[in-house]
Each structure stands twice: as C-alpha cells, then as structure tokens.
Image (cartoon, rainbow, N blue to C red):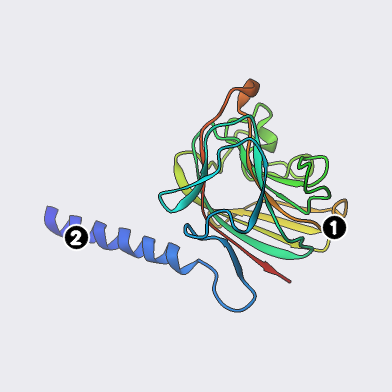
Amino acid sequence: MKRRALVLNYSIACALVLAGCSSVPSGPGWSTLIDGANGLDNWNVLGDANWRVQEGAIVADKGTAGFLVSKNAYKDFTIYAEFWAATDTNSGIFIRATDPKKIGADSAYEVNIWDIRPDPSYGTGAIVNFAKVPVPLVNKAGGQWNVMEVVAQGTSLTVKLNGVTTSTVQDGKFSSGPFALQFGPGVNNVTGGPIKWRKVMIKPS
C-alpha cells in the first residue's frame, strides 16, 4: 500500500511539473529576453547590483540597488516571468518607465515582489500606489519559484502570481516605455535576499 501511495504521489508531482511547463508561452509574437543562456545581452544595467548568470538564471544578491532595463520600449503587452525570491527579497517589475535612466514608482508602474514590505498593502502582487492587495498578504513569493504575468492594454493593467489575479487597475498615467527588473534594498535599507530570473518573455500587442 505504501509503495502504491508513493507511486501515486510521484505521478501527481510529475503531472504538476508538466502542467507548469505547459504554461510557458509559445507561438508568434513572443520575445525571450531571459532564458538562462543569453546573459545580459537584452538589457541595460542600471545601479550597482551584481547581476550575473548563475545556475540557469540571472541573479542579483548584493549592491545598494539595481535594475535590468529592457532595450526596447513597449506600450501594450503581456510579460511572462519566472523568478525565485527569498522571504526578505525586495524586487519587482517596473513597466512603462518614462525615464530609462531613473526607474522608480513615481515614473513607472511598479509591480511589486516583496513579502515583508513595511506597508503590506502594496506588497507582493500589488501595483505600488495604484492597486493594493489584501492584508495580511495572501499570495507570497518567498522561498519558491513563481510565475508572474503582467498584462497592459491601454489603461487596463492586470497582475497574476502563480495563476491568481492579485491586482487590477484602470489608469492612464504611464502609457509607454521600457520595463525593468529590480534588485532593491530590504527593510530599513538592509540588503535583502536574492532575486533570480529564470525566464522572462514579452509579447507586444
């Protein structure tokens, strides 16, 4: 009986892994900016974070703050991103940045990845200053691989974390620009945990 249960559990685990793999986008229109092999070729590096290729991902875990900024600007699009974060990691995806040399929540929409943000209402899955998440935080990223999907269509913005919609908003403040991946300072500016980006894809629309 125990052996049959182990086989069953193994089969379920394999099915879940395959289901996760099948969710990776494919087809025309998609551009892969990170796949574990192309390094930093598709990005402009901003700040002092120690971005590097490590074990099939782009990783940062030291520095005051830093961003990988896309070389192209985008208006309407879908972003698919696989990432790993620690509980104390401060990261995120900044979209439609108006100034590619100065990324921030005042010049872009910040889709947050930060489980222990001092104001948890704009923690993981929120769009900082625009769309809050329930408190206490329900959808967390720390200690595991995650999939984040960001859809921007005109004034409509939607964020999903691991298949769950975490925030939506209608807003027209920022209309176009590059997007950026963040390694940010932790609580009280103490260095937080690492961020690892395993796959990042975008499909303009």
**Residue 175's disc number:** 1
* Element assignment for label 2: helix
| Left or right, 172 with reference to 71 | right
The residue at 78%/54% (across/down) is: 96
For residue 1, say whether it is visible: no
Task: Classify the position of the C terminus by image quarter.
Answer: bottom right
142 relative to 159, above or below: above
Location of residue 79 in the rendering, given as x and y in whole percent from the top left corner: 64, 60
Q: Earlier in the sequence, mark 1 or mark 2?
A: 2
10 Å neighbourhood of mark 1: few (<14), some, or many (≥20)? some
Location of residue 191 in the rendering, given as x and y in whole percent from the top left corner: 57, 26
| Left or right, 151 with reference to 5 | right
**Residue 7's disc number:** 2
* Element assignment for label 1: loop
The amino acid type, in three-letter code, at marker 2 is: Val
187 relative to 56, above or below: above
The residue at 71%/53% (across/down) is: 179
Residue at the farthest front position: 41
Q: Which quadrant holds residue 163?
A: bottom right
